[in-house]
Amino acid sequence: MALPILLTKGLIILVIFGISLLIATYSTYAERKVAAFLQDRIGPNRAGPWGLLQPIADAGKLFFKEDFIPSQASKWLFILGPSLAMFTALMSSAVIPFGDSIRFMWDNVRYDINVQGIEINIGVLYIFGVVSLGVYGVMVGGWASNNKFSLLGAIRAASQNISYEIALGLSIITILMMTGSLSVRQIVNEQASFFEWNVFTQPLGFIIFLTCSFAECNRTPFDLPECETELVGGYHTEYSSMKLGLYLFSEYINMFVSSAFISALYFGGFHYPFMNEVNGALENSLGAITGHNLATALGFLVFFGKILFFIFFFMWVRWTLPRFRYDQLMNLGWKIFIPLSILNVVITGAGLLYNFKYSSWLIAIVMIVLAVTSQAKAPKQQVVPQRS
Amino acid sequence: MQLTNRAKQVSNKEMTLAEKMYLPAVVSGLAITIKHFFRKKPTIQYPEVKKYLGPIYRGHHILKRDEQGRERCTACGLCAVACPAEAISMVAAEREKGEESLYREEKYAAVYEINMLRCIFCGLCEEACPKQAVYLRHDQMVPVFLERDEVIYGKDRLVEKMDDRYIRKNSEVKTTPTEPSLTRSAT
């Protein structure tokens, strides 16, 4: 490979990595701020202006706490747990297409380098492979702690992740059917025009995917692995200092990666309405190279806007909804989401046979009608006369 | 009789399909929280902004002087007797010649100490005082102390300064707070 390609690629990876970690770090701050705002409070505001140095202060505190390993724990597995969680969370960001391409001339040859860690044509498979490894971080951590509560938490986490991964995979199959490719970039490029965004063609798949991502990230309302009331903390009961920090931080990286996938798979990635017109105007006025790079930068920003919105959405849901009960969680995963997504696959397949992309709406409409009629048929809540 | 009229009869009825689908309820919950996101926060940024606590707030103790700058306290000890927390202690002394401009009457407190760790700011000392010498300021709090030897307040910190006299005519009057940070929030 030519040197400039390597350099550009390295630069792109560095920038993506840096921005991802920065966003994950500041998500911890944003989480506390959003939580405070949703509860009519102000949130961290002591460290730095508006509390902006809070993540640094938190990290400093975590570093200086005692790094404790229980004497009965298996030491190496105990250390391996958080690093596994962190590792898998970071790995999956490699195939996200963050932008179109950077274009430059070198020796009279025009190069187009994709703004993406690595472009592989089995991107979606890779994602599922890596994401499903994430449960090992939790399992190993819970097992190595040699604590019954941690083990219970880890097992709960494992069964939850497995049951929701199936629905996650099934809900995404419809997109693969419509695109005919496993490459994430290909899926994103299929959504170039606004009304072809998968969220409009696959509303049901989107809702299932979104909910399952919540469960995959172990975020509320699906944060059953850590449950103070039942498990004295969950799989990371025995963890302290930066090891616990790594577990918590990997949750935020997971959230960032999930948001990126939601926006890439369902919300058109770096595409935005009227993108072709804007890009055409930029290339016409500034030349094929500068204009193209500017357009790429614009798409990059749009993509991060979408990611930030979904991170906010994750937090918004977390501070609104209470935790599920464990049997409800399992019911929802196995009895509702999996049949629904299979139905979605069937209907989408039938629609594709007749070149009708929006067939997934059929289920959505049927469900809305059912809901409305059941609501109408339901007996009105009796107004109990107030005793005076 | 009911305390509020917000009581609701609890029912254990079967959920309708719309309720079983969770989503409508989830969306309405999200709508409620996002409304709170944009709401004005009722928080007061305490150490920087202080609220006016009203004319009858009981704060920092003060030993009054009269108009000519003479200390009013005669060390009668009634405040110490009235104090339920036994925070006040004093040593009386006799006024000598040449000290008439310092002390109002023949007897005065040579030492007057309040233990701020014990004080419960009940205001009974203020009520017990026959000479109107001890007051609890309504506009100033006892500052935070970090060392144990800062806890006992002697006359150096209790007797009022003549250039910053504490005036409280009656409880209806809303005097301007003397602490600079208080004036900011006194709207």
Image (tube, rainbow, N blue to C red):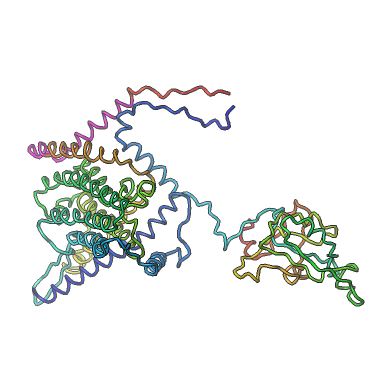
Q: Is residue A354 magenta?
A: yes
Q: Quadrant of residue B88?
A: bottom right
Dominant SS type (magenta): helix
Q: Is residue A88 visible?
A: yes
Q: Residue at x 21, y 54 (%)?
A: A264
Q: Quadrant of the C terminus of chain B?
A: bottom right
Q: Position of residue A10 (x, y in %)?
A: 18, 72
Report x, y in % for residue B11. 41, 27
Q: Which of A253/A66 is in front?
A: A66
Residue sticking out furthest to the front: A72
Where is the N terminus of chain B found, in terms of image quarters? top right
Q: What is the tally of numbered marks visible in this picture?
A: 0
Q: Is residue A80 above or below residue A6?
A: above
Question: Residue B182: within the magenta?
Answer: no
What range is drawn magenta here?
A349-375
Q: Viewed as shown, does residue B12 lie left or right of A100? A: right
Asked whether residue A276 is in view, the answer is no
Question: Looking at the image, which is closer to me, A241 or A373?
Answer: A241
Residue B80 lies, in percent from the top left, at: 78, 60
Residue ID at (40%, 54%): A34
Q: Position of residue B135 (x, y in %)?
A: 76, 60
The residue drawn where x is 62% and y is 67% is B145
User: Above or below — where is A369 with respect to A158?
Assistant: above
Q: State which quadrant residue B166 falls in.
A: bottom right
Depicted A354 relative to depicted A135: above or below? above
Foreground: A378 or A302? A378
Q: Quadrant of residue A83?
A: bottom left
In this image, A324 relative to B159: left or right? left
Residue located farthest toward the right when viewing the structure as drawn? B97
Q: Nearer the viewer, residue A156 or B182?
A: A156
Residue at 61% over, 65% down: B144
* Left or right placement of residue A202 versus residue A109 in this view: right
